[in-house]
Image: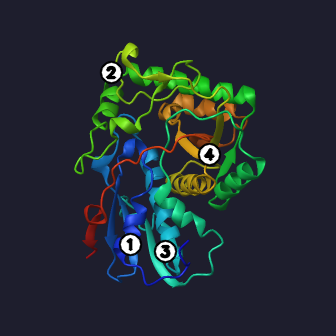
């Protein structure tokens, strides 16, 4: 494992770590600019990489950017610098979602494993085994979410069935919606540095038992030609939620999501995101009831387990994600 203090990081080092973050449909809807002080990175929304039909409010875009912010913080701490983060720092610049300034020497990190996990984390949309997650791991994942101001809860069997039913209903709606189905299709590509998106090999099979509703990103293929395999009989689902539902909460939820994913990766736990029900306002409202907390605002449903490592998706380089220095 690398030392917690190596050298003064370059902005390219930090941006390279940031762009390893997950994003909805691998849209990578972010831009990075170096502020005039030369020690602050601005993270802006790349609106043209948003999903107009699937994510009209930009909530998922904010979660994606939040994940990149967490990676920036982890990388800065790895290089021995204290990351000073501000969310939505300038109300007159709504596309400026966060800034991360390199402060003075960081205290010794209590989670040095997260930086190594950052480079190994991939979504795995493949079947998992029925091996249960240890209680200690689930507790650590919940603590990771709590550290970022979010709640990670695991429903019981009835709640899990409710989550799967809502996800299934959302998947059926999306597949039948021409605009949303076409938007999903546009982000499925063979490896392409310009278009990015998701190579077909990362999408995984469908569950032939029809118990776990995996997203059909093609949303146009006849069911008879879909690859199908048996998935786990008792899926482990958890819900990430926040007490409020404002733009800043979405960014915090993204940071919590990435901290949970990195912690899971460090423990050899795979993860995939069941986001479908969150894309329909009425179904999202019902997610809180399904997992037993009417007051919480669901931000993500995660499927966890032990299984094959998912193949990596293409990433924008630090050069293509940066816009140069702010004026």
Q: Which residue is mark 2?
A: 220
Residue 143: x %, y % from top left: 70, 57
**In the structure shown, which secondary structural element does the residue marked by tag 3 occupy?**
helix
Residue at mark 4 to residue at mark 1: CA–CA distance: 29 Å
What label sits on residue 240 in the rendered view? 4
**In the structure shown, which secondary structural element does the residue marked by tag 1 occupy?**
helix
Q: Decide: few, some or many residues near mark 4? Use Cα within 10 Å; few <14, some 14-19, many ≥20.
A: many
* Furthest-left residue in this view: 194
Residue 140, image quadrant: bottom right
Residue 276: x %, y % from top left: 49, 32
Mark 4 touches mark 3? (CB < 8 Å): no
Kindly report which numbered mark, 4 or 1, lies closer to the viewer in this rendering. 1
Residue at mark 2 to residue at mark 1: CA–CA distance: 40 Å
Mark 4 touches mark 1? (CB < 8 Å): no
Residue 215, image quadrant: top left
Q: Is residue 234 left or right of residue 77?
A: right
Residue 14: x %, y % from top left: 41, 70
């Amino acid at each position: 494992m690398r030392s917690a203090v190596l050298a003064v990081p370059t902005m390219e080092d930090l941006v390279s770590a940031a762009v390893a973050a997950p994003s909805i449909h691998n849209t990578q809807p972010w831009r990075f600019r170096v502020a005039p002080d030369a020690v602050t990175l601005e993270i802006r929304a790349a609106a043209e990489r948003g999903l107009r039909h699937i994510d009209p409010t930009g909530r998922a875009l904010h979660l994606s950017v939040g994940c990149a912010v967490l990676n920036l913080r982890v990388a800065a701490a790895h290089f021995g610098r204290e990351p000073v983060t501000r969310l939505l720092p300038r109300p007159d610049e709504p596309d400026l979602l966060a800034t991360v300034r390199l402060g003075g020497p960081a205290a010794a990190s209590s989670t040095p494993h997260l930086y190594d996990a950052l480079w190994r984390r991939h979504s795995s949309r493949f079947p998992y085994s029925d091996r249960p997650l240890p209680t200690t791991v689930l507790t650590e994942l919940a603590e990771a979410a709590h550290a970022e101001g979010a709640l990670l809860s695991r429903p019981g069997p009835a709640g899990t069935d409710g989550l799967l039913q809502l996800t299934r209903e959302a998947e059926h709606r999306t597949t039948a919606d021409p605009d949303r189905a076409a938007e999903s299709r546009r982000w499925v590509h063979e490896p392409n540095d310009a278009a990015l998106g998701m190579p077909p090999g990362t999408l995984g099979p469908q569950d032939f038992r029809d118990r776990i509703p995996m997203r059909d990103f093609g949303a146009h293929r006849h069911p008879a030609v879909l690859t199908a395999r048996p998935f786990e009989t008792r899926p482990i689902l958890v819900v990430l939620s926040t007490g409020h539902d404002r733009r800043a909460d979405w960014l915090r939820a993204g940071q919590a999501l990435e901290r949970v994913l990195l912690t899971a990766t460090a423990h050899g736990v795979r993860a995939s995101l069941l986001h479908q029900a969150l894309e329909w306002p009425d179904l999202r409202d019902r997610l809180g009831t399904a997992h037993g907390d009417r007051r919480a605002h669901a931000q993500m449903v995660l499927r966890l387990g032990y299984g094959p490592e998912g193949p990596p998706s293409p990433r924008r380089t630090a050069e293509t994600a940066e816009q140069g220095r702010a004026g």
